[in-house]
Image (spheres, rainbow, N blue to C red):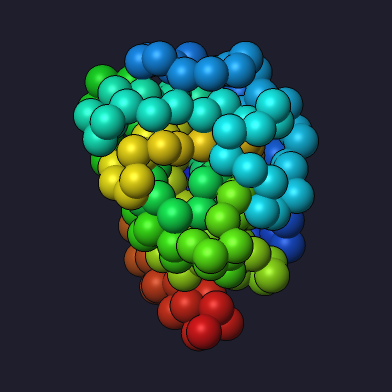
Amino acid sequence: MRNLLFAAVLLMSGAAHAALLGTTVTATGTYSNPLGLVNDGFIPPETTPWASGTNVFWSDGGNNTVRFVFDLGADFLVRDILVSVDNNDAYRAQYSTDASNWTDLFIIPSAGGEISPIQGGLDTLTSEAASLEYLPAMDFAGQIARYISFEAIGGDSSYALAELQIFGDELPVDRPVPAPGTALLLAAGLAAMRFSRQRRGR
């Protein structure tokens, strides 16, 4: 409960830009190119070929066996995520505090971004409503998480992930818990911010 209240305070603080959070990454399945490419901070140009040296790419016959798990090292308030992925596939991001119990964060639909199937290649997408790369399907309310997972869930069975960046805030360690009345005000404020953000992204 305390962490949830801290998260509410952070969300209402009006911070314009959440910090880029450092991660370590692991993966299951068989893929090509070094795993470190997906969190090295480099975002390839859009339309870069999916099987390029800047990307981790894989083909699994639709079995969806490759799954990436990004570890933040501690719980954070995760505000936004940016990805660079093959444009004509569907992907799912989930979050967890313990790497055992997972909840969907968003699903990217196939060809949901600005790069058309005819153009092909990588597409940069983000949940940040103020960005030119904003994809409404990725929009989510801030969540407390230590782990973010990412996997392909559909498409042409040839997938790529070039970069995944997580933005958020540290959770305060020892602060007094707001009174119940304050908590209700925080909840109302969060609902208003969510509505405002959805309108801004339209």
Q: Is residue 164 left or right of residue 8?
A: right
Q: Quadrant of the N terminus?
A: top left
Q: Is residue 187 left or right of residue 56?
A: left
> 36 and 111: which one is in front?
111
Q: Which one is in front, 170 or 124?
A: 124
**Residue sitting at 58 percent across and 33 percent down?**
51
Q: Residue at x 36, y 15 (%)?
A: 29
Q: Residue at x 40, y 72 (%)?
A: 191
**Closer to the camera in the image, 68 or 100:** 68
* Picture layout, residue 200 above or below residue 162: below
Q: Position of residue 192 (x, y in %)?
A: 46, 78
Quarter-wise, where is residue 131 in the image? bottom right
**In the current view of this chain or complex, which residue is farthest to the front?**
118
Quarter residue 157 falls in: top left
Q: Is residue 69 visible?
A: yes
Looking at the image, is 68 positioned above or below residue 110?
A: above
Determine the image quadrant of residue 52. Answer: top right
Find residue 109 and report its horizontal and vertical position in percent: 36, 59
Task: Report x, y in % for residue 118.
Answer: 53, 65
Q: Position of residue 78 (x, y in %)?
A: 52, 44
Number of dots carrying numbers: 0
In this rendering, would 25 be left or right of 67? right
Front residue of 199 and 60: 60
Q: Is residue 146 visible?
A: no
